[in-house]
Amino acid sequence: MCAGVYVCLCVCVCMYQVPVINVRGVQLAALFMHGVEHALFVNDVAGSPLPPNLFCPWMFFDGKLFQYKLLKSTAAAASLRQLCDDSVRCFVYSVCGPLQAPAL
């Protein structure tokens, strides 16, 4: 279910309150950020084919929203659609990807 949390994190925006910070969530977020750091390093070694500002975590990662979605996914047997707050656009994007998602 963690992969669904990452996908919904990228495309869903909502107002949220996180009652408890989960240790597992902090570890997963740190692992994700290590991956971003490695991707930035590979980009630099390759001569920066991608603009370095694409790797700025504040542009695409919200730790509070990640904690909220993780708690929501572990509290009950939440489906991917429930993690996307029943948003059809978000659900289609997370299942099909950005290029195949139909315009709604």
Image: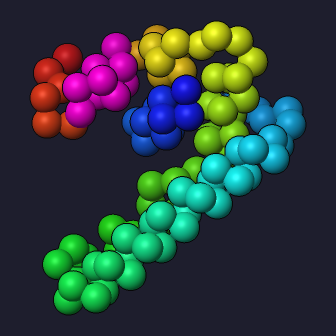
Q: Is residue 5 visible?
A: no
x, y percent for residue 30 = 64, 60
Residue range highlighted in magenta: 88-97
Does the magenta portion include 92? yes
Q: Is residue 64 above or below residue 76?
A: below
x, y percent for residue 29 = 63, 53
Does the magenta portion include 95? yes
x, y percent for residue 17 = 76, 33
Q: Is residue 82 above or below residue 48?
A: above
- In which quadrant of the rendered view does residue 99 lie? top left
From the viewer's side, name the closer residue of 91 and 37.
37
Q: Residue visible at 71% across and 44% down?
A: 25
Horizontal relation, residue 23 to residue 46: left or right: right
Quarter of the image with the C terminus is top left
Horizontal relation, residue 84 to residue 64: left or right: left
In the displayed orientation, state which residue is furthest to the right.
Answer: 20
Mark count: 0
The image's colouring method is rainbow
From the viewer's side, name the closer residue of 28 and 7.
28
Quarter of the image with the N terminus is top right
Q: Residue visible at 24% across and 33% down?
A: 97
Q: Residue visible at 47% across and 64% down?
A: 35
x, y percent for residue 59 = 44, 61
Q: Is residue 82 visible?
A: yes
- Overall secondary structure of the magenta section: helix
